[in-house]
Image (cartoon, grey):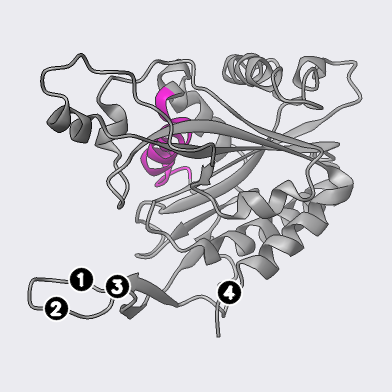
């Protein structure tokens, strides 16, 4: 099913390629017309694309989860959540956003694994500890786990429509007495920190023993720029280290444009239901396309 296509989307800025003969400014941009379409999740065509995006979202710890079971669960609720495509319904999604009721699905093995995992990570975040441990049958909390990911070159302007459509779909589901009356929304995301490059260090310390990669400053950088806006409405948020240990050369395999390595981290944002609509409006204002 094709959803409403936001009229604001279509013209996307991309960096202009520069060769040896191009002495133009780094600020030069080309404008591309890209026709984004928003779809309901399609069980017949989206399994592999969603699995790839979920693997990207969970990053180093993706191997800890049965991603096939997770995607099957996402696709079992096709009227909730969105995918974004550029080449029609039969193509792979470039982005997705959905919500899973951790209370409703607490008996499913994949959700049990996710709850256990996120509980351990949330235990180190103030005001978040213990919330996921209380998703049992007698709990007053119904946590909606928001999963969203996109290809690295997707424009952030696609995010507000997905959140707005999600709010509408949750409202419609509640009118039909479906189990989506959440008390809290928990958003799983990713951040990263920059570290000194070991490749550069090896060039200057060829005869010395290599030291562990060292973080450059204490700044956190965001793969999803909307996260910083969501923080303003959250009751809790914080980073966490992945359980799986990265390979020694992995930070350099993800070097950024300024030649630093990067170390990704997981990120959690917890928003009460009463603040969620306001948070989505703020994201829409922050990411509205530039005139």
Q: State the quadrant of the C terminus.
A: bottom right
17 vs 125, left or right, is: left
169 vs 203, left or right, is: right
Q: Secondary structure at mark 3?
A: loop
Residue 53: x, y in percent?
Answer: 42, 41
Return the residue at label 3: 26
Mark 3 or mark 4, which is nearer the start of the sequence?
4
> Which residue is drawn at the image coordinates 71% and 17% (left, top)?
123
For marks 2 and 4, give the CA distance: 36 Å
Other-residue count near label 2 (Cα within 10 Å), few / some / many at <14 / 14–19 / ≥20: few
Q: Please name which of the two marks, 3 or 1, marks the residue nearer to the observer.
A: 3
Q: Are marks 2 and 1 in contact (CB under 8 Å)?
A: yes
Which is more toward the observer, 29 or 11?
29
Return the residue at label 2: 22
Disc assigned to residue 6: 4
Disc assigned to residue 147: none
> Which residue is drawn at the image coordinates 41% and 52% (left, top)?
93
Mark 1 or mark 2, which is nearer the start of the sequence?
1
State the extent of the magenta-drawn residues as a range. 43-60
Mark 1 or mark 3, which is nearer the start of the sequence?
1
For marks 2 and 3, give the CA distance: 10 Å
Other-residue count near label 1 (Cα within 10 Å), few / some / many at <14 / 14–19 / ≥20: few
Q: Are marks 3 and 1 in contact (CB under 8 Å)?
A: no
Mark 4 or mark 2, which is nearer the start of the sequence?
4
Return the residue at label 1: 17
> Which residue is drawn at the image coordinates 30% and 39% (left, top)?
254
């Amino acid at each position: 099913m094709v959803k409403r296509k936001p009229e604001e989307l279509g013209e996307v800025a991309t960096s202009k390629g520069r060769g040896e003969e191009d002495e133009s400014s780094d600020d030069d941009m080309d404008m591309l017309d890209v026709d984004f379409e928003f779809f309901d999740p399609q069980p017949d065509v989206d399994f592999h694309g969603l699995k790839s995006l979920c693997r990207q979202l969970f990053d180093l710890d993706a191997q800890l989860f049965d991603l096939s079971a997770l995607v099957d669960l996402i696709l079992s609720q096709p009227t909730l959540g969105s995918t974004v495509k550029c080449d029609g319904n039969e193509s792979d999604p470039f982005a997705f956003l959905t919500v899973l009721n951790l209370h409703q699905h607490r008996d499913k093995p994949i959700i049990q694994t996710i709850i256990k995992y996120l509980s351990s990570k949330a235990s180190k975040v103030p005001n978040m500890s213990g919330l996921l441990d209380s998703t049992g049958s007698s709990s007053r909390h119904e946590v909606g786990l928001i999963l969203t990911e996109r290809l690295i070159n997707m424009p952030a302007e696609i995010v507000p429509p997905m959140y707005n459509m999600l709010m509408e779909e949750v409202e419609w589901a509640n009118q039909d007495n479906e189990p989506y009356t959440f008390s809290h929304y928990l958003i799983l995301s990713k951040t990263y920190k920059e570290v000194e490059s070991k490749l550069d260090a090896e060039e200057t310390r060829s005869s010395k023993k290599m030291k562990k990669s060292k973080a450059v400053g204490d700044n956190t950088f965001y793969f999803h720029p909307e996260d910083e806006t969501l923080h303003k409405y959250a009751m809790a948020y914080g980073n966490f280290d992945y359980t799986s240990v990265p390979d020694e050369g992995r930070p350099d395999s993800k070097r950024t444009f300024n030649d630093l390595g990067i170390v990704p981290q997981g990120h959690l944002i917890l928003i009460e239901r009463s603040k969620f609509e306001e948070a989505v409006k703020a994201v829409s204002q922050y990411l509205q396309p530039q005139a």
